[in-house]
Image (cartoon, rainbow, N blue to C red):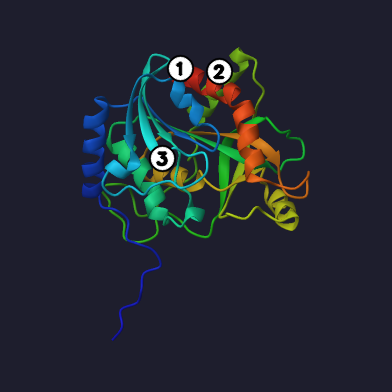
Amino acid sequence: MNTPTPLSPAPASAAAVQQAADILREAIGFAPDAAIVLGSGLGGLADAIEGPVYLPYAELPGFAVSTAPGHAGRFVAGRLAGKQVLCMQGRLHFYEGHPMQAIAFPVRVMKAAGARALILTNAAGGVNADFSVGDLMVIEDHINFMGQNPLTGPNDEAIGPRFCDMSTAYTPALRTLAHEVAKAQGVRLRQGVYLGYMGPSYETPAEIRAFRLLGADAVGMSTVPEAIAAAHCGLPVLAISLITNMAAGMAGKLSGDEVIETANQKAAVLQRLITGIVGGL
């Protein structure tokens, strides 16, 4: 009798997560106050870290390597705004061919290494017609349109529960802190729903119209698997999107180079905001 082929690889065990976490913790020398995932064009925040320690993902067991443009594919650890931070300078995407379990793995490792909060950033397309290129949006909730979930497969109760509550996946207290810091800095900070799309093709105008009807304010190709993994292992999450373009059918032709260029132009505002939020943790 033939054995059915699983839809995706089995999730890493708690022991595998802890093994990578121990190596990471030894390399950086501290338990981070916050872990930060830097999205497309936003890796420059790592340059502001004091006393940086670098660790390529390839040097950690169980880690996949990022191939997306503008993603360095390494950890950067050190001090930011007086706090100990651990940054992922580049993330893993489902469209690169990584299974969802591989995308969840770094989140679980950072939690096991002692991180007390996770800050996710991304470059996103604006779906809400009231948004403008360059806006920042705190994610209050998401819609998973990626077709898979990182919790699929056998569950290790040492990492998290079989059925994970997503009611407050984006931690309200951290959203409040973000708004307080933004107000103090004079930054307009929007709040809305992020729709995670598989990619790598951009959405069609018809899809964007449908997503707007579903209640999406922004769309992107990341963040959702990481937020689910964080909720599963009990890691508080704050997620902020930089609107780098208006979505398909709302402006001109879409280009990956344009997204990165806009992110580079507007990144300083987001970096300053993230620094203030870290200081307030």
Q: Quadrant of residue 2?
A: bottom left
Name the residue that disc number 1 marks: 280
How far apart, in angstroms, are the residues tagged by discs 1 and 3? 27 Å
In this picture, residue 60 sits left or right of residue 238: left
In this figure, which residue is indicated by the disc labeled 3? 73
Amino acid under disc 3: Gly
Element assignment for label 1: helix
Of labels 2 and 3, earlier in sequence is 3
* Lateral position of residue 148 relative to residue 263, left or right: left
Quadrant of the drawing holding the C terminus: top left
Q: Which residue is mark 2?
A: 181
The amino acid at mark 1 is Gly
Residues under labels 2 and 3: Cα distance? 29 Å
Residue 217 appears left or right of 42: right
Q: Position of residue 7 (x, y in %)?
A: 40, 67
* Dot 3 crowding, Cα within 10 Å, few <14, some 14–19, many 20+: many
Point out the tag, 1 or 3, that comes first from the N-terminus: 3
- As displayed, is residue 51 above or below residue 234? above
User: In x, y percent, where is residue 271?
Assistant: 53, 23
Q: Quadrant of the N terminus?
A: bottom left
Q: How many marks?
A: 3
Residue drawn at (56%, 45%), measured in percent from left and top? 142
Q: Do labels 1 and 2 touch, CB within 8 Å?
A: yes
Image quarter of residue 101: bottom left
Viewer-side residue, 74 vs 21: 74
Q: CA distance from mark 1 to mark 2?
A: 8 Å
Say what amino acid the circle numbered 2 marks. Answer: Val
The answer to whether residue 182 is visible is yes
Whole-percent x and y of residue 47? 45, 22
Residue at the image point whose x is 44% and y is 26% from the top: 46
